[in-house]
Image (cartoon, coloured by chain):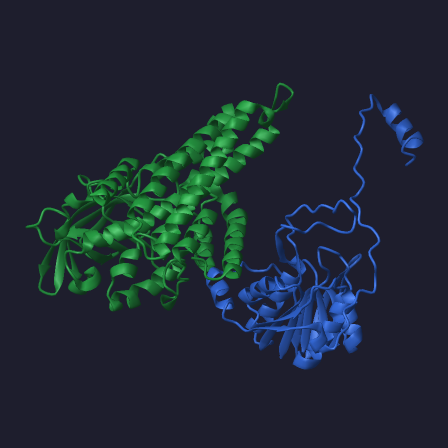
Chain colours: A blue, B green
Amino acid sequence: MKALVAVKRVVDYNVKVRVKSDGTGVDIANVKMSMNPFDEIAVEEAVRLKEKGVVTEIIAVSCGVTQCQETLRTAMAIGADRGILVETAADLQPLAVAKLLKALVDKEQPGLVIVGKQAIDDDCNQTGQMLAALGDWPQATFASKVEIADGKLQATREVDGGSESLSMSLPAVVTTDLRLNEPRYVTLPNIMKAKKKPLEVVKPEDLGVNVEPRIKTLKVSEPPVRSAGIKVPDVATLVDKLRNVAKVI
Amino acid sequence: MIRDPETINLLLDTIARFVNERLVPMEAHVAETDQIPDDVVADMKELGLFGMSIPEAYGGMGLTMEEEVLAGFAVAQTSPAFRSLFATNNGIGAQGIVIDGTQAQKDFYLPKIATGEIIGSFALTEPDSGSDAGSLRTSAVKDGDFYVINGTKRYITNAPEAGIFTVMARSDTSRKGADGISAFIVEKGTPGLSLGNIDKKMGQKGAHTCDVIFDNVRIPASNLIGGVEGIGFKTAMKVLDKGRINIAAASVGAAERILRDAIRYAKERKQFGKAIGEFQLIQAMLADSHAEIYAARCMVLDAARKRDDGHNVSTEAACAKMFASEMCGRVADRAVQIFGGAGYLAEYGVERFYRDVRLFRIFEGTTQIQQLVIAKNLLRDAA
């Protein structure tokens, strides 16, 4: 069974982002970029399934600018067998990515698609669900455990107040939660080997997908700055402030 | 020479992440116990740190010198004891075989060195022969298909951990100088080979050195590196040229880390109502340190690129090693000063770096030997 894994190039999680002065977005010039951490978990899960003999081939897909090749090389260093870059400079929104992935799914016929539950840049949390809908596939979102046996996928999902167990037929879409696994360190020899793995570049037009944005961003702004606190002399004053100034009790 | 920027960036990111997440948190523990925990060593092997400079054909990564120094900057951002363990496999403990070894020697040893299955150690220095390496007295006498080695080697890095030793010994006792010296591979456990007590050092706890004693150690003649007698000293010098660039890279990496710690402290520590980093006398120390690090970094990269281009870099390697190691000493000294009283306390770690980096000015040729090498080359070339 083939597994398709989607990986997104995002601002590294260690970077403190700043909003552009004109409010049109976040400044990503000269900022360190890495693979979305949830996608790293997705690649790791696919590699573990391959090591268990469930998955035979892992295809990593990234949609975006040329530099996404670096993200694909990372995925291949973790253990993906080959990479596909859907190259475009367009502002990609979840529906466009889901459609691109759907086109690749039709072409590659994977038995399983694993994506991160959301990307840490826009926090959309939509692509996996949209892909499942487009393909009319079952989906296990926010999976914290995945097992495949006898052609069925058993997943544990993290939901408010506990966990939920699902069983579904394949092919299916899985979106990864933080606790699904802990991605391995990429080893240096595997980074060198990843250089030799095949990486195919296609354009959205080749897949017959219109990636034009459907949603327009009006304004991006920094969160309001927290004002300094005050010290109160006694409990009575505290209660008074909470009641009459903060109006929380 | 950078062959592929994408790959080298990924490689450096991976090393940086490993250093920050796995090694930096262990620094104090390693210094206290004088031991790198086994699981950390296993992770270092798994990551591939032992085979960076071993050719790809033998399971290593075959980094170019420029790539290797970039990796060197990255791995040196933590206690030098960590790099010490795998540095001999990438450097002096393996390069003798990489540069001058026979095909059979390469096929047999290099794959094991690349994975870290065996640790390579380089045995040149003796009780009476340090900087004047050409005067070494350890002897290797041919006896049929064997050589019999006798003598003592001193301050041998990684000797307690080593699986093989590259040993410089005099195979022709009639010749006093460098020409009579050959290089041999001696495996751990060979009868007659014994180790002294682990040396108590000023710093770099967790990295071990000790005496290696050869008492009628019989090794097969096929363990003569390159299969030719009398080229051992030249082998050693080639190994050391590369080693010097690596030590220079380590000095730059360590200095970068020390300065980063000093900057953080200068921004946090408040005196006279403001962060000490706002005082110009502190700023001067930070600025001087940064400028010197930048200069050393440029020298290291230049020497590495020239070596990749096939030039003889004896002078450049000596200049880079001398300048970078002395620079690192100054940066560490200023960092202790910026930390003030805290700089003298073990808790803050900066005094540990101060002691650790002191070695950079001594091994792989002292500063004074580098001066001699540089001056000798200048005078020779001016003729």
- Quarter that holds the N terminus of chain A: bottom right
Near-viewer residue (B315 or B76): B315
In the figure, is residue B331 to the left or right of A123?
A: left
From what the image shows, is residue A226 above or below residue B193?
Answer: above
Q: Position of residue B153 (x, y in %)?
A: 21, 45
Q: Determine the image quadrant of residue A174.
A: bottom right
In the figure, is residue B230 to the left or right of B16?
A: left
- Quarter that holds the C terminus of chain A: top right
Q: Residue furthest top?
A: B272
Residue at 80 percent across and 73 percent down: it is A133
Does residue B224 appear in this view?
yes
Residue at 49 percent across and 70 percent down: it is A196
From what the image shows, is residue B60 above or below residue A230?
Answer: below
Q: Position of residue A78 (x, y in %)?
A: 55, 64
Total number of numbered labels?
A: 0
From what the image shows, is residue B295 above or below residue B169?
Answer: above
Near-viewer residue (A89 or B243): A89
Q: Determine the image quadrant of residue A69.
A: bottom right
Q: Residue furthest left?
A: B174
Does residue B203 appear in this view?
no
Residue at 76 percent across and 44 percent down: it is A21
Q: Position of residue A187 (x, y in %)?
A: 49, 60
Q: Position of residue B294 (x, y in %)?
A: 47, 40
Near-viewer residue (B148 or B196): B148
In the figure, is residue A209 to the left or right of B198?
A: right
Q: Residue furthest front?
A: B383
